[in-house]
Amino acid sequence: MQASAMEIIEATLREDYEPNAEEIALVIATLSNDEEKWRDRHGMLKLEGYELRPRLRPGWKPSWLESGADPLECEDGETLPVSYFADQSNPSL
């Protein structure tokens, strides 16, 4: 049975835990609660001329699943560092 992302995160609290590559990829591929909030605002922000990074767009699929790249080396493998900040751009500015 495969562990859930939350089970893996909880396991990392043990001193002797060493995650494997698949577990790391699963955790990185799971949006945090804060990231889900930004994703849910995507439509409103887009109407105002802003575009969120790919990870925060509805329907996002981790790029490393197709490319086979290391998720830690992919732009969309980076999670949000704090709850009130998200990369966005307004092409009209």
Image: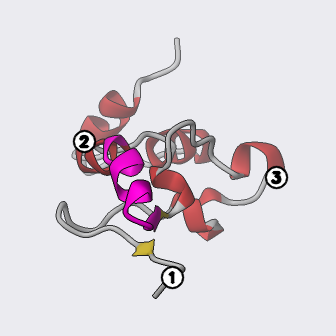
42 displayed left or right of 12: right
Residue at the image point whose x is 33% and y is 40% from the top = 40
Quarter of the image holding residue 25?
top right
Give the foreground label among 2 and 1: 1
Q: Tell which residue pokes out farthest to the bottom in this image.
A: 93
**First reached walking from the N terminus: tag 3 or tag 1:** 3
Residue at the image point whose x is 34% and y is 50% from the top = 44
Residue type marked 2: Asn
78 displayed left or right of 70: left
Q: Tell which residue pokes out farthest to the left in this image.
A: 84
Q: Are marks 3 and 1 in contact (CB under 8 Å)?
A: no
Residue type marked 1: Ser
Category of crowding for the residue at label 1, using alpha-carbon neighbours closer than 10 angstroms: few (below 14), some (14–19), many (at least 20):
few
Category of crowding for the residue at label 2, using alpha-carbon neighbours closer than 10 angstroms: few (below 14), some (14–19), many (at least 20):
few
Q: Whole-percent x and y of residue 12?
A: 30, 46
Front position in the image: 82 or 24: 82
Alpha carbon of mark 2 to alpha carbon of mark 1: how far?
Answer: 29 Å
Q: Which residue corresponds to mark 3? A: 67
Residue at the image point whose x is 69% and y is 51% from the top = 63
**Circle 1 SS class:** loop
Q: Which residue corresponds to mark 1? A: 92
Magenta residues span 40-51
Give the foreground label among 2 and 3: 2
Q: Does the magenta-highlighted stretch encompass residue 50?
A: yes
Residue type marked 3: Ser
Alpha carbon of mark 3 to alpha carbon of mark 1: how far?
Answer: 31 Å
